[in-house]
């Protein structure tokens, strides 16, 4: 049998661009070479799709501040419809750099590791749906609600899942009457977390311990999004995470815990990716059997409520009184060498190669079911 061609799609037009490159490297390293042939597509911050070289990606630093796409590679274009023989085509644009490349690349399935807007929010998923290309992970709806923390929390509340109190602030309202908006937010007790509604990897998030810090934190968050969450914090919460592997009967991993020791006071971007000692992952988390089962149940219920498919990481808080709170879902969780999603699955008995294989097989099966649907009466 010929190998299946897997397009690893990474980079993107968000502030999580560099983390996506690290995730793509890990996925590439984890692909089963007996079954799959990788084709790398990097999306630069201008939105161009570029072929990428495997050797170059594998040789780059694991520091997100030092990784980058090779922008001299040929550009590619996704065909607007499936090909007649079932091989979905990506065309390489003509030019001297493309002389040694095939003009058409047969792609069987796409593995997107695009974090943040323009990749994790349903936009790319919609493009792939229109092109008829199977892809790993949540669909258009699940991706969209999983990206927007406000809509996500509204659905979790509707499903009677525990969510911390929060307020939503839109840029236009804040700019219209900054003083009034800040005055109303003073009712929220510290600590407060200020977050862009549509980003991950802790980009744009600040922990506010004193009220005088609130305005600057809001301004900072608005640099990344037009909608900001002002969320009630907890004193000394435990950060518990569960990985969910989808399919018709999704499973939850053993829970893990992130123990943060960083000047930011929470699991910030710097604590995650820059400071090697910023956080320690305890896998599995030190929880009683009952609390372990409760965390797994909350992860699965959140995954189902938010239309998850394929994969997700569900983040929880455990307060000092022993109550769990659902923080958020990540529909394309970090896939780097230090990311919790593959670590949690490894601890649950699913190694990286098997994990990637199961995700691809799930995507292909969903693609087959979609193609079998009736399109006429």
Image (cartoon, grey):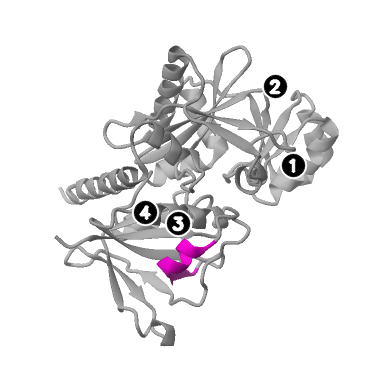
Say which label, 3 or 2, has the lower sequence index.
3
Q: Is there a contact, CB below 8 Å, between mark 3 and mark 2?
A: no
Say which label, 4 or 3, has the lower sequence index.
3
Crowdedness near tag 2: few (<14), some (14–19) or many (≥20) residues, C-alpha within 10 Å: few
Q: Which marked residue is nearer to the observer: mark 4 or mark 3?
A: 3
- Residue farthest to the bottom? 96
Q: Which residue is mark 1?
A: 218
Q: Which residue is mark 3?
A: 25
Residue at the spot 48% in from the left edge and 30% down from the top edge: 283
Q: Which residue is mark 4?
A: 111
Q: Which residue is mark 2?
A: 235
Q: Which marked residue is nearer to the observer: mark 3 or mark 2?
A: 3
Quadrant where the image shows the N terminus:
bottom left
| Nearer the observer, 373 or 134 | 134
Q: Which residues are magenta?
A: 48-60
Residue at the spot 41% in from the left edge and 18% down from the top edge: 293
| Nearer the observer, 114 or 372 | 114
Residue at the spot 17% in from the left edge and 48% down from the top edge: 372
Estimate the x, y position of residue 288 in percent, counting from the top left.
Answer: 47, 14
Q: Which marked residue is nearer to the observer: mark 2 or mark 1?
A: 2
* Res 112 quadrant in image: bottom left
Indicate which disc residue 128 carries: none
């Amino acid at each position: 049998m010929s190998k299946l061609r897997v397009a690893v799609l990474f980079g993107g037009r968000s502030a999580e661009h560099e983390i996506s490159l690290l995730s793509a490297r890990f996925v590439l390293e984890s692909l089963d070479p007996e079954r799959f042939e990788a084709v790398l597509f990097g999306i630069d911050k201008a939105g161009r799709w570029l072929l990428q070289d495997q050797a170059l990606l594998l040789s780059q630093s694991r520091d997100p501040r030092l990784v980058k796409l090779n922008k001299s590679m040929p550009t590619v274009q996704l065909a607007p419809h499936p090909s007649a023989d079932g091989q979905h085509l990506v065309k390489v644009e003509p030019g001297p750099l493309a002389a040694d490349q095939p003009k058409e690349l047969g792609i069987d399935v796409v593995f997107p590791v695009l974090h943040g807007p323009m990749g994790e929010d349903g936009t790319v998923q919609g493009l792939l749906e229109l092109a008829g290309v199977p892809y790993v992970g949540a669909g258009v709806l699940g991706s969209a609600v999983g990206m927007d923390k406000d809509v996500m929390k509204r659905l979790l509340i509707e499903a009677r899942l525990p969510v911390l109190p929060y307020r939503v602030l839109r840029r236009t309202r804040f700019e219209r009457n900054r003083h009034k908006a800040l005055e109303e937010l003073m009712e929220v007790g510290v600590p407060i977390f200020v977050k862009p509604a549509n980003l991950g990897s802790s980009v744009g998030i600040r922990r506010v311990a004193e009220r005088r810090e609130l305005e600057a934190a809001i301004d900072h968050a608005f640099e990344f999004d037009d909608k900001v969450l002002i969320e009630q914090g907890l004193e000394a919460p435990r950060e518990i995470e569960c990985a969910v592997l989808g399919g018709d009967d999704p499973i939850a991993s053993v829970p893990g815990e992130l123990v943060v020791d960083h000047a930011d006071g929470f699991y910030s971007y710097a604590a995650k990716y820059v400071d090697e000692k910023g956080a320690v992952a305890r896998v599995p988390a030190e929880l009683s059997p009952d609390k372990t089962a409760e965390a797994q149940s909350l992860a699965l219920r959140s995954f189902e409520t938010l239309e998850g498919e394929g994969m997700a990481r569900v983040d929880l808080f455990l307060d000092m009184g022993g109550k769990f709170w659902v923080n958020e879902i990540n529909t394309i969780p970090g896939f780097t060498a230090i990311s919790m999603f593959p670590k949690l699955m490894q601890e649950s008995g699913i190694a990286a190669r098997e994990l990637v294989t199961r995700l691809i097989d799930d995507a292909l099966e969903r693609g087959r079911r979609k193609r079998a649907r009736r399109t006429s009466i």
